[in-house]
Amino acid sequence: MEVVVGKARLRSLLEHFGELKDCREPAKVRYPLSEVLFLVVAATIAGCDDYDEIALWGETHRDFLRRFSEYYFGTPGEDWLRVLMNRIDPALFQACFTDWARKLRPDAADLIAIDGKTSRRSHDRGRGQKPLHLVSAFATTQRLVLAQEAVDEKENECGVIPEILDRLNIEGALVTIDAIACNPKIAAAITDRKADYILAVKANQPTLNKDIAIFFADHASEALFCSDVDKDHGRIETRRVLVSHNINWLLSGRRYPDEPRFPTLASIIMVESIVETKGNVHTERRYYISSATLTPERAAEAIRGHWRVETSLHWVLDVTFKEDQSGLRRGHGARNMAVVRHFSINLIRLAKGKHSIKTTRKAAGWNPDELARILNVQPR
Protein backbone atom coordinates (compact mmCIF):
# COMPACT_ATOMS: atom_id res chain seq x y z
CA MET A 1 0.00 0.00 0.00
CA GLU A 2 1.29 3.45 -0.88
CA VAL A 3 2.02 5.68 2.11
CA VAL A 4 1.22 9.39 1.75
CA VAL A 5 3.92 11.47 3.43
CA GLY A 6 5.29 14.98 3.35
CA LYS A 7 3.91 17.50 0.91
CA ALA A 8 2.08 14.83 -1.08
CA ARG A 9 -0.49 14.51 1.72
CA LEU A 10 -2.80 17.36 0.75
CA ARG A 11 -2.05 16.93 -2.94
CA SER A 12 -3.53 13.46 -2.56
CA LEU A 13 -6.50 14.93 -0.69
CA LEU A 14 -7.18 17.51 -3.42
CA GLU A 15 -6.94 14.82 -6.08
CA HIS A 16 -9.59 12.81 -4.22
CA PHE A 17 -11.82 15.90 -3.94
CA GLY A 18 -11.43 16.43 -7.68
CA GLU A 19 -12.77 12.94 -8.38
CA LEU A 20 -16.08 13.63 -6.61
CA LYS A 21 -19.00 14.02 -9.00
CA ASP A 22 -20.51 17.52 -9.11
CA CYS A 23 -24.24 17.26 -9.91
CA ARG A 24 -24.51 20.93 -10.94
CA GLU A 25 -24.57 22.19 -14.53
CA PRO A 26 -20.96 23.17 -15.39
CA ALA A 27 -22.01 26.50 -16.94
CA LYS A 28 -23.68 27.55 -13.68
CA VAL A 29 -20.87 26.55 -11.32
CA ARG A 30 -19.40 29.57 -9.57
CA TYR A 31 -17.76 27.64 -6.77
CA PRO A 32 -16.01 24.42 -7.90
CA LEU A 33 -16.66 21.52 -5.55
CA SER A 34 -12.97 20.88 -4.91
CA GLU A 35 -12.51 24.52 -3.83
CA VAL A 36 -15.53 24.38 -1.55
CA LEU A 37 -14.27 21.20 0.14
CA PHE A 38 -10.78 22.66 0.54
CA LEU A 39 -12.34 25.75 2.14
CA VAL A 40 -14.47 23.67 4.52
CA VAL A 41 -11.60 21.43 5.63
CA ALA A 42 -9.15 24.35 6.04
CA ALA A 43 -11.68 26.42 8.00
CA THR A 44 -12.59 23.45 10.21
CA ILE A 45 -8.92 22.91 11.05
CA ALA A 46 -8.67 26.63 11.83
CA GLY A 47 -11.39 26.37 14.48
CA CYS A 48 -14.66 26.90 12.59
CA ASP A 49 -17.52 24.59 13.59
CA ASP A 50 -20.56 25.92 11.67
CA TYR A 51 -21.38 27.12 8.17
CA ASP A 52 -21.61 30.78 9.22
CA GLU A 53 -18.13 30.61 10.76
CA ILE A 54 -16.72 28.80 7.72
CA ALA A 55 -18.25 31.35 5.32
CA LEU A 56 -16.86 34.30 7.30
CA TRP A 57 -13.45 32.65 7.59
CA GLY A 58 -13.37 32.09 3.82
CA GLU A 59 -14.33 35.72 3.15
CA THR A 60 -11.53 37.02 5.38
CA HIS A 61 -8.89 34.52 4.17
CA ARG A 62 -9.31 34.61 0.41
CA ASP A 63 -5.68 35.62 -0.09
CA PHE A 64 -4.63 32.49 1.77
CA LEU A 65 -6.99 30.27 -0.19
CA ARG A 66 -5.80 31.71 -3.51
CA ARG A 67 -2.30 30.52 -2.73
CA PHE A 68 -3.62 27.02 -3.42
CA SER A 69 -6.48 27.42 -5.92
CA GLU A 70 -8.10 30.05 -8.11
CA TYR A 71 -11.28 30.99 -6.22
CA TYR A 72 -12.19 33.20 -9.19
CA PHE A 73 -15.59 34.17 -7.76
CA GLY A 74 -14.38 34.27 -4.20
CA THR A 75 -15.89 31.97 -1.56
CA PRO A 76 -19.54 30.97 -1.02
CA GLY A 77 -21.71 32.44 1.72
CA GLU A 78 -23.42 30.47 4.45
CA ASP A 79 -26.52 29.59 2.40
CA TRP A 80 -24.47 28.40 -0.59
CA LEU A 81 -22.30 26.29 1.70
CA ARG A 82 -25.35 24.71 3.25
CA VAL A 83 -26.87 23.89 -0.14
CA LEU A 84 -23.63 22.41 -1.51
CA MET A 85 -22.82 20.31 1.55
CA ASN A 86 -26.41 19.03 1.63
CA ARG A 87 -26.18 17.89 -2.00
CA ILE A 88 -22.88 16.00 -1.95
CA ASP A 89 -23.47 12.26 -2.17
CA PRO A 90 -22.41 11.07 1.33
CA ALA A 91 -21.53 7.58 0.09
CA LEU A 92 -19.10 9.00 -2.49
CA PHE A 93 -17.69 11.47 0.03
CA GLN A 94 -17.11 8.69 2.56
CA ALA A 95 -15.46 6.56 -0.12
CA CYS A 96 -13.24 9.53 -1.00
CA PHE A 97 -12.23 9.86 2.66
CA THR A 98 -11.61 6.13 3.11
CA ASP A 99 -9.41 5.89 0.03
CA TRP A 100 -7.37 8.89 1.18
CA ALA A 101 -7.13 7.64 4.78
CA ARG A 102 -5.92 4.19 3.68
CA LYS A 103 -2.86 5.82 2.14
CA LEU A 104 -1.95 7.38 5.48
CA ARG A 105 -1.37 3.97 7.09
CA PRO A 106 1.85 2.01 6.85
CA ASP A 107 1.75 -1.51 5.44
CA ALA A 108 2.37 -3.08 8.84
CA ALA A 109 -0.44 -4.93 10.61
CA ASP A 110 -2.26 -2.73 13.07
CA LEU A 111 -4.78 -2.44 15.87
CA ILE A 112 -8.15 -1.33 14.50
CA ALA A 113 -11.05 -0.42 16.78
CA ILE A 114 -14.61 -0.27 15.43
CA ASP A 115 -17.10 1.72 17.45
CA GLY A 116 -20.19 3.88 17.00
CA LYS A 117 -21.12 7.43 18.03
CA THR A 118 -24.39 9.37 17.90
CA SER A 119 -24.57 13.09 17.01
CA ARG A 120 -27.30 13.89 19.49
CA ARG A 121 -28.67 17.14 18.03
CA SER A 122 -28.83 15.89 14.44
CA HIS A 123 -32.38 14.54 14.85
CA ASP A 124 -35.43 16.22 13.32
CA ARG A 125 -38.53 15.26 15.28
CA GLY A 126 -40.84 17.09 12.91
CA ARG A 127 -39.69 14.90 10.02
CA GLY A 128 -39.33 11.74 12.09
CA GLN A 129 -35.58 11.78 11.49
CA LYS A 130 -33.43 10.01 14.07
CA PRO A 131 -30.02 11.33 15.21
CA LEU A 132 -27.07 10.52 12.97
CA HIS A 133 -25.17 7.47 14.22
CA LEU A 134 -21.77 6.83 12.64
CA VAL A 135 -19.78 3.61 12.96
CA SER A 136 -16.07 4.36 12.60
CA ALA A 137 -12.91 2.32 12.12
CA PHE A 138 -10.03 3.82 14.09
CA ALA A 139 -6.33 2.92 13.93
CA THR A 140 -5.58 3.08 17.64
CA THR A 141 -1.78 3.15 17.35
CA GLN A 142 -1.65 6.04 14.86
CA ARG A 143 -4.93 7.53 16.22
CA LEU A 144 -6.28 8.01 12.70
CA VAL A 145 -9.84 7.60 11.46
CA LEU A 146 -9.86 5.06 8.63
CA ALA A 147 -13.51 4.78 7.58
CA GLN A 148 -17.06 5.43 8.72
CA GLU A 149 -20.59 4.44 7.80
CA ALA A 150 -23.93 5.86 8.91
CA VAL A 151 -26.75 3.77 10.41
CA ASP A 152 -30.18 4.89 11.60
CA GLU A 153 -29.60 3.69 15.18
CA LYS A 154 -27.01 1.95 17.35
CA GLU A 155 -28.77 -1.42 17.21
CA ASN A 156 -28.01 -1.64 13.48
CA GLU A 157 -24.22 -1.26 13.81
CA CYS A 158 -23.56 -4.93 13.00
CA GLY A 159 -25.10 -4.59 9.55
CA VAL A 160 -22.51 -2.07 8.32
CA ILE A 161 -19.39 -3.55 9.92
CA PRO A 162 -18.71 -5.96 7.00
CA GLU A 163 -19.07 -3.00 4.58
CA ILE A 164 -16.47 -1.03 6.54
CA LEU A 165 -14.13 -4.03 6.62
CA ASP A 166 -14.44 -4.38 2.83
CA ARG A 167 -13.07 -0.85 2.37
CA LEU A 168 -9.94 -1.50 4.42
CA ASN A 169 -6.95 -3.74 4.08
CA ILE A 170 -7.18 -5.49 7.45
CA GLU A 171 -5.02 -8.51 6.63
CA GLY A 172 -2.86 -9.27 9.66
CA ALA A 173 -4.62 -6.68 11.83
CA LEU A 174 -6.23 -7.22 15.23
CA VAL A 175 -9.78 -5.80 15.20
CA THR A 176 -11.52 -4.88 18.46
CA ILE A 177 -15.29 -4.34 18.76
CA ASP A 178 -17.60 -3.86 21.73
CA ALA A 179 -20.13 -6.46 22.85
CA ILE A 180 -22.83 -5.30 20.40
CA ALA A 181 -20.91 -7.15 17.67
CA CYS A 182 -20.11 -10.27 19.68
CA ASN A 183 -21.68 -12.81 17.33
CA PRO A 184 -20.33 -15.53 15.00
CA LYS A 185 -21.27 -13.61 11.85
CA ILE A 186 -19.08 -10.61 12.70
CA ALA A 187 -16.29 -12.88 13.90
CA ALA A 188 -16.36 -14.74 10.57
CA ALA A 189 -16.42 -11.45 8.63
CA ILE A 190 -13.11 -10.55 10.27
CA THR A 191 -11.35 -13.91 9.99
CA ASP A 192 -12.52 -14.35 6.38
CA ARG A 193 -10.52 -11.19 5.60
CA LYS A 194 -7.36 -12.72 7.14
CA ALA A 195 -7.49 -10.65 10.32
CA ASP A 196 -8.09 -11.53 13.97
CA TYR A 197 -10.73 -10.26 16.38
CA ILE A 198 -11.10 -9.39 20.04
CA LEU A 199 -14.80 -9.18 20.92
CA ALA A 200 -16.17 -8.07 24.26
CA VAL A 201 -18.55 -10.56 25.89
CA LYS A 202 -21.41 -9.11 27.90
CA ALA A 203 -25.13 -9.63 28.48
CA ASN A 204 -25.91 -10.20 24.80
CA GLN A 205 -24.05 -13.55 25.14
CA PRO A 206 -25.20 -14.45 28.68
CA THR A 207 -24.26 -18.15 28.59
CA LEU A 208 -20.83 -17.49 27.11
CA ASN A 209 -20.25 -14.64 29.56
CA LYS A 210 -21.17 -16.87 32.51
CA ASP A 211 -19.07 -19.81 31.26
CA ILE A 212 -15.94 -17.68 30.85
CA ALA A 213 -16.46 -16.09 34.27
CA ILE A 214 -16.74 -19.53 35.90
CA PHE A 215 -13.67 -20.76 34.03
CA PHE A 216 -11.47 -17.92 35.29
CA ALA A 217 -12.88 -18.25 38.80
CA ASP A 218 -11.76 -21.89 38.82
CA HIS A 219 -8.60 -21.72 36.70
CA ALA A 220 -7.14 -18.23 37.16
CA SER A 221 -3.91 -19.69 38.51
CA GLU A 222 -3.38 -21.59 35.23
CA ALA A 223 -3.81 -18.52 33.00
CA LEU A 224 -1.09 -16.24 31.64
CA PHE A 225 -1.30 -12.76 33.12
CA CYS A 226 0.20 -9.29 33.31
CA SER A 227 -0.66 -6.40 35.60
CA ASP A 228 -0.11 -2.68 36.07
CA VAL A 229 -1.03 -0.03 38.66
CA ASP A 230 -2.25 3.55 38.14
CA LYS A 231 -2.16 6.11 40.97
CA ASP A 232 -3.85 9.47 40.53
CA HIS A 233 -5.55 11.96 42.90
CA GLY A 234 -5.96 9.47 45.72
CA ARG A 235 -7.27 6.78 43.39
CA ILE A 236 -5.36 3.52 42.96
CA GLU A 237 -6.34 1.18 40.14
CA THR A 238 -4.76 -2.24 39.76
CA ARG A 239 -5.45 -3.97 36.44
CA ARG A 240 -4.80 -7.63 35.71
CA VAL A 241 -5.16 -9.14 32.26
CA LEU A 242 -5.52 -12.94 32.22
CA VAL A 243 -5.39 -14.97 29.00
CA SER A 244 -6.10 -18.66 28.53
CA HIS A 245 -5.68 -20.71 25.38
CA ASN A 246 -7.61 -23.60 26.91
CA ILE A 247 -10.77 -23.27 24.82
CA ASN A 248 -11.60 -26.89 23.97
CA TRP A 249 -14.42 -26.86 26.50
CA LEU A 250 -16.15 -23.97 24.66
CA LEU A 251 -18.10 -26.21 22.30
CA SER A 252 -21.73 -26.55 21.34
CA GLY A 253 -23.89 -29.01 19.43
CA ARG A 254 -26.15 -26.60 17.59
CA ARG A 255 -25.81 -28.01 14.07
CA TYR A 256 -23.34 -30.83 14.46
CA PRO A 257 -21.32 -32.34 17.35
CA ASP A 258 -18.42 -30.19 18.59
CA GLU A 259 -19.38 -27.15 16.50
CA PRO A 260 -17.43 -24.13 17.85
CA ARG A 261 -19.52 -21.15 18.86
CA PHE A 262 -17.12 -18.73 17.18
CA PRO A 263 -14.80 -19.39 14.21
CA THR A 264 -11.12 -20.02 14.92
CA LEU A 265 -11.49 -19.16 18.60
CA ALA A 266 -8.03 -19.27 20.18
CA SER A 267 -8.06 -17.22 23.40
CA ILE A 268 -10.36 -16.11 26.19
CA ILE A 269 -9.49 -13.03 28.23
CA MET A 270 -10.43 -11.53 31.57
CA VAL A 271 -9.60 -7.95 32.52
CA GLU A 272 -9.90 -7.36 36.26
CA SER A 273 -9.85 -3.80 37.61
CA ILE A 274 -9.54 -3.18 41.35
CA VAL A 275 -10.13 0.48 42.25
CA GLU A 276 -9.34 1.84 45.72
CA THR A 277 -10.65 5.31 46.72
CA LYS A 278 -10.76 6.62 50.29
CA GLY A 279 -10.93 3.17 51.79
CA ASN A 280 -13.51 1.86 49.34
CA VAL A 281 -12.60 -1.01 47.05
CA HIS A 282 -14.49 -1.78 43.84
CA THR A 283 -13.71 -4.76 41.60
CA GLU A 284 -14.88 -5.10 38.01
CA ARG A 285 -14.25 -7.98 35.61
CA ARG A 286 -14.73 -7.85 31.84
CA TYR A 287 -14.47 -10.77 29.45
CA TYR A 288 -13.35 -11.10 25.83
CA ILE A 289 -12.81 -13.74 23.17
CA SER A 290 -10.19 -13.69 20.41
CA SER A 291 -9.22 -15.62 17.31
CA ALA A 292 -5.54 -14.83 17.98
CA THR A 293 -3.25 -16.76 20.31
CA LEU A 294 -2.53 -13.70 22.43
CA THR A 295 -0.05 -12.91 25.14
CA PRO A 296 -1.48 -10.95 28.09
CA GLU A 297 0.59 -7.94 27.04
CA ARG A 298 -0.80 -7.96 23.49
CA ALA A 299 -4.35 -8.40 24.79
CA ALA A 300 -3.90 -5.49 27.20
CA GLU A 301 -2.51 -3.29 24.44
CA ALA A 302 -5.45 -4.01 22.12
CA ILE A 303 -8.15 -3.63 24.77
CA ARG A 304 -6.73 -0.39 26.13
CA GLY A 305 -6.36 0.79 22.55
CA HIS A 306 -10.08 0.22 22.00
CA TRP A 307 -10.89 2.43 24.99
CA ARG A 308 -8.83 5.13 23.25
CA VAL A 309 -11.66 5.55 20.72
CA GLU A 310 -13.62 7.36 23.42
CA THR A 311 -10.83 9.72 24.46
CA SER A 312 -8.99 10.21 21.17
CA LEU A 313 -11.97 10.35 18.79
CA HIS A 314 -15.43 10.66 20.34
CA TRP A 315 -14.37 13.03 23.14
CA VAL A 316 -12.36 15.16 20.68
CA LEU A 317 -15.33 15.39 18.30
CA ASP A 318 -17.71 16.42 21.09
CA VAL A 319 -15.48 18.76 23.10
CA THR A 320 -13.01 20.18 20.58
CA PHE A 321 -15.12 20.11 17.39
CA LYS A 322 -18.49 20.56 19.21
CA GLU A 323 -20.10 17.81 17.16
CA ASP A 324 -22.82 17.11 19.72
CA GLN A 325 -23.85 20.77 19.56
CA SER A 326 -24.19 20.78 15.79
CA GLY A 327 -27.81 21.27 14.71
CA LEU A 328 -27.39 20.17 11.08
CA ARG A 329 -30.49 18.17 10.18
CA ARG A 330 -31.52 18.70 6.55
CA GLY A 331 -30.11 16.93 3.50
CA HIS A 332 -26.72 15.25 3.73
CA GLY A 333 -25.08 18.07 5.70
CA ALA A 334 -24.72 16.23 9.01
CA ARG A 335 -23.11 13.14 7.41
CA ASN A 336 -20.82 15.15 5.16
CA MET A 337 -19.66 17.50 7.91
CA ALA A 338 -18.90 14.46 10.09
CA VAL A 339 -16.58 13.29 7.31
CA VAL A 340 -15.01 16.78 7.12
CA ARG A 341 -14.23 16.58 10.85
CA HIS A 342 -12.56 13.22 10.29
CA PHE A 343 -10.45 14.72 7.49
CA SER A 344 -9.49 17.53 9.87
CA ILE A 345 -8.66 15.27 12.82
CA ASN A 346 -6.35 13.15 10.67
CA LEU A 347 -4.53 16.14 9.20
CA ILE A 348 -4.11 17.76 12.61
CA ARG A 349 -2.91 14.53 14.22
CA LEU A 350 -0.30 14.02 11.51
CA ALA A 351 1.11 17.53 12.01
CA LYS A 352 0.26 18.76 15.51
CA GLY A 353 3.56 17.97 17.25
CA LYS A 354 3.58 18.39 21.02
CA HIS A 355 0.45 20.55 21.30
CA SER A 356 -3.12 19.38 21.87
CA ILE A 357 -5.64 19.29 19.03
CA LYS A 358 -7.47 22.25 20.60
CA THR A 359 -4.30 24.35 20.76
CA THR A 360 -3.25 23.32 17.26
CA ARG A 361 -6.61 24.45 15.86
CA LYS A 362 -6.25 27.81 17.59
CA ALA A 363 -2.73 28.24 16.24
CA ALA A 364 -3.98 27.42 12.72
CA GLY A 365 -6.68 30.08 13.09
CA TRP A 366 -4.20 32.68 14.30
CA ASN A 367 -1.40 32.01 11.84
CA PRO A 368 -2.01 31.14 8.14
CA ASP A 369 1.53 29.74 7.88
CA GLU A 370 0.72 27.27 10.66
CA LEU A 371 -2.45 26.27 8.81
CA ALA A 372 -0.41 25.76 5.63
CA ARG A 373 2.01 23.58 7.59
CA ILE A 374 -0.85 21.40 8.85
CA LEU A 375 -2.33 21.13 5.37
CA ASN A 376 1.22 20.33 4.28
CA VAL A 377 1.14 21.57 0.71
CA GLN A 378 3.24 24.02 -1.27
CA PRO A 379 1.48 27.11 -2.62
CA ARG A 380 0.87 26.90 -6.39
Image: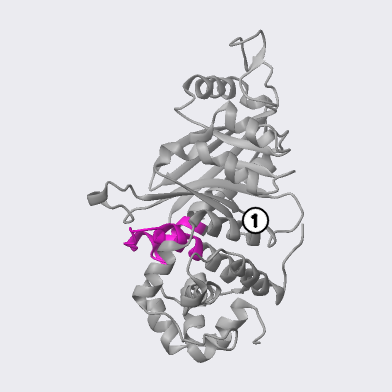
Q: Position of residue 187 (x, y in %)?
A: 62, 32
Residue 149 within the magenta-colored segment of the rendering = no
Magenta residues, start to end: 313-341
Instruction: Tell me the residue at 50%/21% (across/down).
Output: 210
| In front of the other: 302 or 278 | 302
In which quadrant will I find the N terminus? bottom right
Residue 334 within the magenta-colored segment of the rendering = yes
Residue pushed farthest bottom? Answer: 63
Observer able to see residue 366: yes
The residue labelled by disc 1 is: 141
Q: Is residue 346 above or below residue 113?
A: below
SS for dot 1: loop
Where, by quadrant of the figure, is residue 174 drawn?
top right
Q: Position of residue 374 (x, y in %)?
A: 60, 77
Left or right placement of residue 16 versus residue 231 in this view: right
Give amino acid for label 1.
Thr
Most frequent secondary structure within the magenta stretch: helix
| In front of the other: 89 or 208 | 89
Where, by quadrant of the figure, is residue 18 drawn?
bottom right
Q: Position of residue 92 (x, y in %)?
A: 55, 57
